[in-house]
Amino acid sequence: MVDVQHWLSALPPGVVYLIVAGVIGVESMGVPLPGEIVLVSSALLAATGVVEPEWVASAAAFGAIVGDSVGYAVGRRGGRPLLARLGRRFPKHLGPAQLARAEQSFARHGVWAVFFGRFVALLRILAGPLAGALHVPYRRFLVANAAGGLVWAFGTTYLLYSVGKAAEHWLKDISWAGLVLAVLAGLGSTWWLRRRAHRVTSTDSPSGVEVASDGQSAAVASDVDPVRAGNEH
């Protein structure tokens, strides 16, 4: 992340905003990219005055909302075969087991999986294409997508921006003690947000998911139809 931040600091602010929007947008379409690393690095740059936090957050939100919408359209047109191809191309990120977990989250929580999925790496990538493939109503998807994108982008940016500004001030007046407190505050807030998101999206038991011996997995919709559940939510 330090290398990313150093690389971004050498670019004009406008280019940084475009990179933030582009990387997060492509990631939201279903392609594993370091969107969160780019956002964190840019937010910390904002604390040093290199870029403006409101523009970083706006670019991130724009990329998240548009990217998820494009991913939704692609998933709706390509369906499950598209997700299977993505799994073969990116087996570590979008393999059968990951797809089954994401699908089960949609079956349980409907569009709320889109909102909280913005804070979880797996669903941040799969939410758009999977919602499209499951034919979740676009209007409901868009509301959850926009809300999650705005909260994630502005919350992450301004949290890290505030931590960075506080650390800079404390380093001048209270030396390293301020930096330690600032880092702990930031880590604690981020941990709390992720814990809340994982409570909604994680699956503690393997019930509902069967992994075959050949490496393929399938969601066993014992009493839950993912498409119907997504629609009802």
Image (spheres, helix red, strand yellow):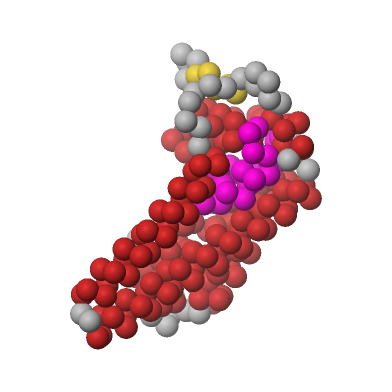
Near-viewer residue (162 or 48): 162
Percent coordinates x, y for residue 74 in the rendering: 70, 43
168 to the left or right of 90: left
Which residue corresponds to the image point at 51% horizontal and 42% vertical from the top-left? 199
Q: Quick check: can you spot residue 88?
A: no
Mainly helix, strand or loop, the magenta region?
helix
Q: Residue at x 65, y 21 (%)?
A: 221
Question: In the rendered image of this protein, does residue 79 appear above or below residue 52?
Answer: above
Residue at (49% x, 64% y) in the render = 156
Location of the N terminus by quadrant is bottom left
| Residue 233 located left or right of residue 98 | right
In terms of image quadrants, where is residue 223?
top right
In the picture, the quarter occupied by the C terminus is: top right
Image spot of residue 230 (x, y percent): 72, 37
Q: Residue 111: give x, y in percent of width and height.
A: 68, 44
Work out which residue is located at the far bottom of the displayed protein and give it.
173
Magenta-drawn stretch contains 104:
no
Judged from this view, the residue extending furthest toward the top is: 213
User: Which span is picked out in magenta?
Assistant: 107-134
Q: Is residue 120 magenta?
A: yes
- Look at the picture and state if 15 lies above or below 127: below
Relative vertical location of residue 181 with respect to residue 47 in this rendering, above or below: above
Q: Is residue 123 above or below residue 15?
A: above
Residue found at x 52% / y 51%: 119
